[in-house]
Amino acid sequence: MSKPTLLLIDDEERILRSLRMLFMTNYNVRMTTDPHEAIRILREETVHVIISDQRMPVMQGSALLAIARETSPATMRILLTGYSDLEASIASVNEGEVFRYLMKPWAADEVRQVVAEATAIAEASFAVQLQAPAEPGKEEKKPRVLIMDNDEFISKTVSDILGDRCEIIWANTAQHAMEELAKQDISVVVSDLVLGDTNVGYILKTIKQLNPQTQCIVVTNFNDTSRLIDLINQAQISRYLPKPLNKNSLARNLDSMLARFHTLRSQPVLANRQTVAQISDPKEKLQSGNFMGMLGRLRARIGV
Amino acid sequence: MRFTDNDTFARDIHSLVNPIEAIAPDRPVSEVAELFLSPDYAKVLSLPVVENGRPIGVISRYRFMDLYLKQYARELHGRRPIRHYINDRPLLVELDQPLTEAALHIAEHMSFPLTEDFIITRHGKYLGLGYVMDLLKAMESQMRANSNELNQAYSRLKSSQLALVQSEKMASLGQMVAGIAHEINTPLGYVQNNVAVGQELFIHVKNMIAGYESLVDNLLNEQANEEEISAQMAQIAAMRQDLNAEEMLGDMQGLMVDSLYGIGQISELVMNLKNFSRMDAAATEAINLNDCIESALNIGRNVLRNKVEIIKELAELPKLTCTPSQLNQVFLNLFTNAAQAMETMGRLHICSWYDEHAVHVSVSDNGKGIPQENLVRIFDPFFTTKPVGEGTGLGLAISHQIIQQHGGEIHVESRLGVGTDFHISLPFAVGNAAENRQSTDFE
């Protein structure tokens, strides 16, 4: 069996040579300093995993990965950067839809593990016919959208946008949110990072373990790059939108996330593309464990 | 002198009221004279004369002295009503009048020498007598309180200004350090990975050598078992299949060269930081100003790269005595401002030259320019056009002050849509300026 292909892009050749050495035994490694060359390779060859730098003179990594999304949707996208700036990390979520946001300097073992994981997922994706999802049937019940925000305004805005296409549930406490999530039929979550006085990071990070198809849109005015990077890797949030909210942008993103939920339901193997990394923060790990335990009990009670 | 009970905080007219019993206008002069002798009135200069609750005048001790100095005055005037002897234009103060206003009124109308107290009324009705000295005392304590407040406000302002200056320094330093830290991450990334990869390769190669050696040992051993030897050979062949050691070692050699280069890069970045901060150098030094420009460019590289093309025209300069760390800060501030003014890739033109008096540096960009109304305020502390949280508005104010401390000048010219020029001149004779440097606000 031929080796899977790994495509590396960085404007520093020494990074490319170094990574190539790490992967050459198990992968067919393609590398370039030129993003346009990378786009050509993506078009012409089967690339399982692409690892791109963020800051490059010709093109930002997040923009390259956005093109990769179009050109080769099955390819898994990873950003490897020395710069933890907010703009780049937001773009990597919203445009690049990256599988992982990794920092330089990296731990060789960790990157190897991430790439191995991504490769397995990419192989499964390539095997699936990427077909257009069927329109939701009439018999199907309305998608449920959960709003986790202190401010009812967000919930009202979502109701305005979606009208009666969806059932909107507004939760302004972590407890309420968890109870709704326990029912496992939430399509899209629109959430701030803080609910009451609870930091809901751990809830977002647990959602994919409950239901890999659920899509998370984070709407917040909270700007902490390292927390966002954690949410990319450990929660695979699909969108990160700033407050004050732009209604048009929310509407656009709600539509595409509802469509994606539908696709993933018909092709569950694709949900693996949003496999999350382990929660790194010990406190959040504990909270997530408790949440899962509570879910078990809730489900037994409501009989899901 | 008599004080009101709470003399330290006599903040209103209320506290000045002495409920002295008023006298009726029909009381005979001699009776009023007797009153002045009573210990109850020992401290009053004058007595209020009140008719139907309203004060109609005052009669003072002084007036009595005047009167009684004349011959037969007692006999002539003693039985007449006091009404005819009073000053019918007494000093009047309303109870709810502000202290300052009352004091002003009294100061304007009182007579010298001070012979009368003032009358305090409520809605025009007599309430009591006030002593001018009390009023003065109250005024003084109020002024003292005011000046304490002013002093406190001043020191709060001063310390918050210091905090802001500090935060501007920290903000620009933080931005710089973050930039450098990120820049270090790239060489650090491949150097670290190369070492990790090298370590793994090292283990493979070590195993391989061990395999070869035991094979060689067996080959040299005449009693060796043929089967064992062929097993060893198969094992070595398998290892060779897994790993092309020669090629890998060749690649690894290249990675070693890369690693040394990367370490060189890291050292250079650390050196730039050290040069910029000049922590280990004397504060004041004779240096070539071009070095400050280069140092600031090195540090700002991260912000400037991909934003501006830098064109340098630096003349050979004589040395100038200055505080290099401060001038580094000025140049970095000007360079990063210019980069931030660029909407697309721009040009930054840096020139240096000198004449008999001074060294000159100009920093010109072709950015969006600064509108006239902002240009006049550009060196004002706290003036900023950046969004809240992105600039303290102190960068150029501090730069301005640093240049002034060096006895130099900084000027700005700008045209909208064309660009902005900063011109700095630093005189060679800065002796006085350098000595005066300690007493500045921005230090």
Image (cartoon, coloured by chain):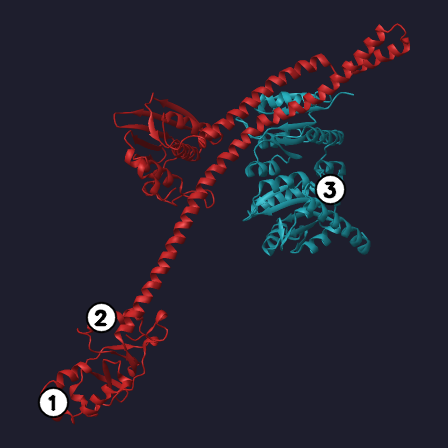
Chain colours: A cyan, B red
**Secondary structure category for the residue under label 3:** loop
Q: Earlier in the sequence, mark 2 or mark 1?
A: 1
Residue A25's disc number: none
Q: Which residue is mark 1?
A: B73
Question: Residue drawn 77% across and 17% down?
Answer: B207
Q: How busy is the neighbourhood of tag 3: few (under 14 within 10 Å), some, or many (20 plus)?
A: many
Q: Amino acid at mark 1?
A: Ala
Seen from the viewer's position, the closer of residues A246 and B395 is B395
- Mark 2 and mark 1, same subunit? yes
Q: Is residue A3 left or right of residue B152?
A: right
- Host chain of mark 3: A
Residue A23 position in % (x across, y down) = 70, 23
How many labels sit on residues? 3
Q: Nearer the viewer, mark 3 or mark 2?
A: 2
Q: Which residue is mark 2?
A: B107
Mark 3 vs 1: CB contact within 8 A: no
Question: Residue drawn 16% across and 84% down?
Answer: B64
Residue B146 position in % (x across, y down) = 34, 62
Q: Amino acid at mark 3?
A: Pro
Q: Is residue A19 left or right of residue B433?
A: right
Residue B294 in view of the camera: yes
Seen from the viewer's position, the closer of residues B85 and A300 is B85
Q: Amino acid at mark 2?
A: Ala
Picture layout, residue B376 above or below residue A29: below
Q: Which residue is mark 3?
A: A212
Task: Determine the image quadrant of residue B436.
Answer: top left
Per the model, the C-alpha gap separating discs 3 and 2 is 86 Å
Q: Residue furthest left?
A: B71
**Secondary structure category for the residue under label 2:** helix
